[in-house]
């Protein structure tokens, strides 16, 4: 797995959002805990904060986008996969400067690291379809190269 500051921030954000999904704890308290206990660097912290606070703020839009490509209700998706999918969907929606293939690959890597043995396949398929919808111009441009 990549060790860029954004990759490390994503890794911590998956864990923090997983905790938030299961406990409903205050996001600022979860952030404080992660900064203290996981030793987030100053390079990782801004992106971690972006993901931790803005994914929950955008949950309705994120979950609606995901629901279009899965037959299961979002709340029935494994909590680890759900955290990964929510982060990746947020990035596809709000961070156009990050190439869609990077977003998809990072999601796959996080699913491999934290999810069940085959969860990366589910994450890959869903994110690929979602990227083709949300980043249609970018995905079409890649095909013509």
Image (cartoon, helix red, strand yellow):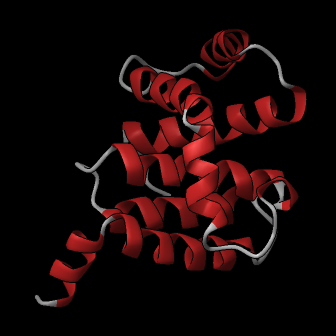
User: Residue sitting at 76 percent across and 61 percent down?
Assistant: 115
In percent of width and height, residue 142 lies at 19, 81
User: Residue sitting at 62 percent across and 31 percent down?
Assistant: 56
Task: Looking at this view, name the residue that lies furthest to the bottom.
Answer: 144
Q: Specify whether 113 is left or right of 134.
A: right
In percent of width and height, residue 81 lies at 72, 58
User: Residue sitting at 40 percent across and 40 percent down?
Assistant: 6
In percent of width and height, residue 40 lies at 52, 21
- Residue 21: image quadrant is top right
Q: Specify whether 26 is left or right of 110.
A: right
How many marks on residues?
0
- Residue 138: image quadrant is bottom left
Instruction: Identify whether 97 is placed above or below 127.
Output: above
Looking at the image, which is closer to me, 61 or 12? 61
- Residue 85: image quadrant is bottom right
Q: Specify whether 75 is left or right of 125.
A: right
Looking at the image, which is closer to me, 4 or 61? 61
For the C terminus, the quadrant is: bottom left
Looking at the image, which is closer to me, 127 or 112? 127
Instruction: Identify whether 43 is placed above or below 18.
Output: above
């Amino acid at each position: 797995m990549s060790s860029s500051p954004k990759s490390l921030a994503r890794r911590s954000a998956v864990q923090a959002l997983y905790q938030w999904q299961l406990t409903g704890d205050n996001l600022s308290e979860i952030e404080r805990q992660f900064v203290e206990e996981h030793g987030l660097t100053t390079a990782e912290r801004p992106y971690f904060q972006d993901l931790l606070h803005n994914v929950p703020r955008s949950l309705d839009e994120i979950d609606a986008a995901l629901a279009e490509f899965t037959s299961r209700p979002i709340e029935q998706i494994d909590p680890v996969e759900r955290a990964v999918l929510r982060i990746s969907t947020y990035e596809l929606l709000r961070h156009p400067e990050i190439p869609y293939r990077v977003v998809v690959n990072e999601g796959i890597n996080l699913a491999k690291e934290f999810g069940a043995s085959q969860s990366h396949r589910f994450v890959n398929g869903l994110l690929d379809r979602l990227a083709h919808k949300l980043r249609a111009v970018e995905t079409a441009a890649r095909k013509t190269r």
